Image: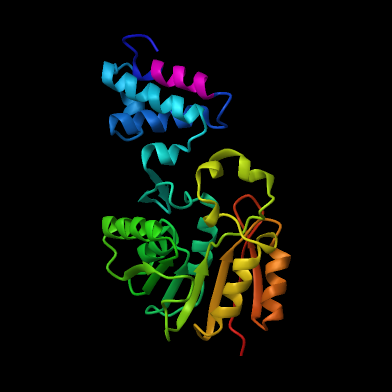
Amino acid sequence: MTQHSTLAQAIAWASGQLQSSSESAKLDAEVLLLHILQKNRSYLFAWPEAELNAEQQQRFATLVERRQAGEPVAHLTGEREFWSLPLYVNNSTLIPRPDTETLVEQALALPLSAQAKVLDLGTGTGAIVLALASEQPGWQLIGVDFSHDAVALAEKNRQRLGFEHVEIYHSDWFSALADQRFDLIVSNPPYICEQDEHLSQGDVRFEPLSALVAPEQGYADIRHIIEQAQAYLAPDGYLMFEHGYQQAAGVQQIFAQMNYRNILTIKDMAGCDRVTMAQKPQ
């Protein structure tokens, strides 16, 4: 960057710096610059010749350097949008992914009552439960997580969005839920195999392994939830998971072993198997 860089020049410089370390170099550069400027995207198109001051240049250069080292953009800005909701993020839990919106879409498509009771297991940032809350103001929604830091983050997001019909609290899966019954239980649990080569690549290097990895080739937590959920589902209640693109058959098999009904797998936007759901055994 030159001493008097315009916004357009700064983006061009950062895009070049990030070309070898990011598949979305220009987008990353724009997001980081907008974070520094505290402006929305239209500002870049309206004022490409506006100049950065010395402090803004220094902060931008620092963020670009950290992005070059692999840090996720969401961690650098402290935010990620999910289901059009602005969510705080940090390194205590997963960064919400667009693929997870498939689970939200399928949950909203179920024939549930306007007062349905819904549980999100392993809520992380609160992305899923808060997305559901934004569409269903009559639902009673609970999000739980084993990580106290994740619970604090999800509660911060809940308060930011003002959803009074959502509760967030600490629980080791079902441990704090006592005798409650739910019309729908959703979860994006750890499902990556401990030996998966992708754990050393991209953004996941900066995310907690406890939120990513599960024993038994990634099926251990899914199996545990399917076994335990029967006691917490209302009659005809649904259980729905996000899982890896090669795990649909395995998840279906566990559901079948536990006598669940109407087992169904749904593909994500990329055409990959992503969500499997079933109904409580009769």
- The foreground one among 258 and 104 is 258
Is residue 276 at all visible to an observer of this figure? Answer: no
Q: Quadrant of residue 170?
A: bottom left
4 on left or right of 257: left
Q: Residue at x 36, y 50 (%)?
A: 87
Position above or below: 202 against 108: above
Residue 65 in the image, given as x and y percentages of width and height: 45, 24
Q: Residue at x 45, y 29 (%)?
A: 66
Residue 56 in the image, given as x and y percentages of width and height: 29, 22
Q: Is residue 141 on the magenta stretch?
A: no
* Residue situated furthest top in the rendering: 3
Q: Is residue 12 on the magenta stretch?
A: yes
Residue 71 in the image, given as x and y percentages of width and height: 48, 35
Quadrant (top left/top right/bottom left/bottom right) for the N terminus = top left
Position above or below: 80 against 4: below
Q: Quadrant of residue 32?
A: top left
Give the magenta-colored segment's residue range: 9-18
